[in-house]
Amino acid sequence: MRNFFNIICIMLGFLTSCRSYAQHQTNGASIKEAKVDSINAVAEKYFQLSKFPIAQNLLQSSLSEAKRIGYKKGEGAAYISLGYIAYDIRNFIAAEQYGKQALDIFRQAHESRLLAESSVIWARAVWAQSRFDEAINAFEEARQLFDHLKDSAGSGNTYSLLAMAEEERGNYEKSFQLFYKSHAV
């Protein structure tokens, strides 16, 4: 039964990849960029299955290809995913580095949604290293971006992360207020 579930998830990744390819074709983007996006999408499915080594290998391949063709959005997306994997396997220094690389790319590209996601993974990584002030500043930046994008799920999640970070600092009243906001968004 588990193998059947894995096959279904991989097929969903493949279908996502096909959709990504079709979108690139209609938008006139290159096939090479579609390949990078497709690899990133399949890696995401492996990540969701906690198949981290497979996802990392795919993302490294995607990263190499994105760098080779100069596709910054694909490169940054791979860094975000690599950051989440590093975070989940408790390699917080690597997660911080990947998050920083994604931040640098998306600040230059003015990609608000991906910049917000980059801020979240970077903040989580520095928070895990007990650098709470830096984390709170980055979570706040992400929250503002999500609010501007009218992304209530992103805003709510970021309010929750802010609440936990404030709790770690001993600011219990502020933590409660932020937690309340996370459910009100």
Image: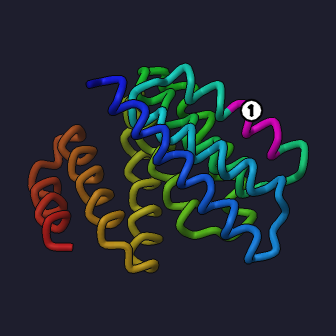
Question: What residue range appears in magenta?
Answer: 60-66
Asked if 89 appears above or below 109 in the picture, the reply is above
Q: Quadrant of residue 158?
A: bottom left
Q: Residue 83: image x %, image y %?
A: 54, 36
Question: How far from the left and from the top, in percent, is residue 9?
Answer: 41, 40
Residue 158 within the segment the image draws in magenta = no
Q: Residue at x 19, y 61 (%)?
A: 178
Front residue of 30 and 99: 30
x, y percent for residue 11: 49, 43
Q: Relative to 94, is 129 on the left or the right? A: left
Residue 64 part of the magenta segment: yes
Residue under numbered circle 1: 61
- In the image, residue 168 sits, relative to residue 2, either above or below, namely below
Q: Quadrant of residue 185?
A: bottom left
Q: Measured along the vertical axis of the image, is residue 54 above or below residue 77?
A: above
Q: How many neighbours does mark 1 have within 10 angstroms: few (below 14), some (14-19), or many (20 or more)?
A: some
Q: Residue at x 50, y 61 (%)?
A: 116
Magenta stretch, overall SS: helix
Residue 62 locus on image (x, y percent)? 73, 39
Q: Quadrant of the N terminus?
A: top left
* Of residues 106 and 34, the one drawn nearer to the viewer in this rendering: 34
Q: Residue at x 65, y 49 (%)?
A: 38
Q: Callout 1, which amino acid?
A: Ser
* Left or right relative to 99: residue 70: right
